[in-house]
């Protein structure tokens, strides 16, 4: 197994940076960056993209294909309990805090 991936950014090879330049004079190219695999990026999208810019470009270009993997056809809901609490602070004065807590008894 390889210890790197080629960046999946659709235009990675078009960015004008010196680290992408390869080849000899007269036949130089801008090449897609390699992304080295390590413990930090192994199980994340950072193992497939050299930068957030390349990731964003890929996600924007393929958003329909990506969301087709796990379509969201209806909303999701998290059961909660909401309570209000009056706070009397000597500096900030009186205010009402809204507490939102997940209702574990109604979790599915
Ligand atoms: Zn890239």
Image: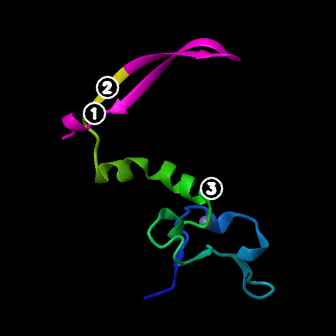
Q: Quadrant of the N terminus?
A: bottom left
> Does 3 appear above or below 73?
below
What are the residue bounds of the magenta stretch? Answer: 83-108
Q: Are marks 2 and 3 in contact (CB under 8 Å)?
A: no
Spatial CA distance of label 2 from label 3 is 39 Å
Say which label, 3 or 1, has the lower sequence index. 3
User: From the viewer's perspective, is 97 left or right of 28?
Assistant: left
Q: Which residue is mark 1?
A: 103
User: From the viewer's perspective, is 79 left or right of 5?
Assistant: left
**Closer-to-camera residue (20/80):** 80
Q: Position of residue 44 (x, y in %)?
A: 47, 65
Residue in the picture at 25% in, 34% down: 74
Disc on res. 22: none
> Does 83 appear above or below 36?
above
Q: Are marks 2 and 1 in contact (CB under 8 Å)?
A: yes
On whether residue 73 falls in the magenta region, the answer is no
Q: Residue furthest top?
A: 94
| Display coloring | rainbow
Q: Quadrant of the C terminus?
A: top left
Say which label, 2 or 1, has the lower sequence index. 2
Spatial CA distance of label 3 from label 1 is 38 Å
Disc on res. 81: 2
* Disc 3 residue: CB within 8 Å of ligand 1: yes
Give the SS element for disc 2: strand
In the rendered image, which quarter is residue 106 located in? top left
Disc on res. 53: 3
Residue in the picture at 72% in, 86% down: 23
> Does 72 appear above or below 85?
below
């Amino acid at each position: 197994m390889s210890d790197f991936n080629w960046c999946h950014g659709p235009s990675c090879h078009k960015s004008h940076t010196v680290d992408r330049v390869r080849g000899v004079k007269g036949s130089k190219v801008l090449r897609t960056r390699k992304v080295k695999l390590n413990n930090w990026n192994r199980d994340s999208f950072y193992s497939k993209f050299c930068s957030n810019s390349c990731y964003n470009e890929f996600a924007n270009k393929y958003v329909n294909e990506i969301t087709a993997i796990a379509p969201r056809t209806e909303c999701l809901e998290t059961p909660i309990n909401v309570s209000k609490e009056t706070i009397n602070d000597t500096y900030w004065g009186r205010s009402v805090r809204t507490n939102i807590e997940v209702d574990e008894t109604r979790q599915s």
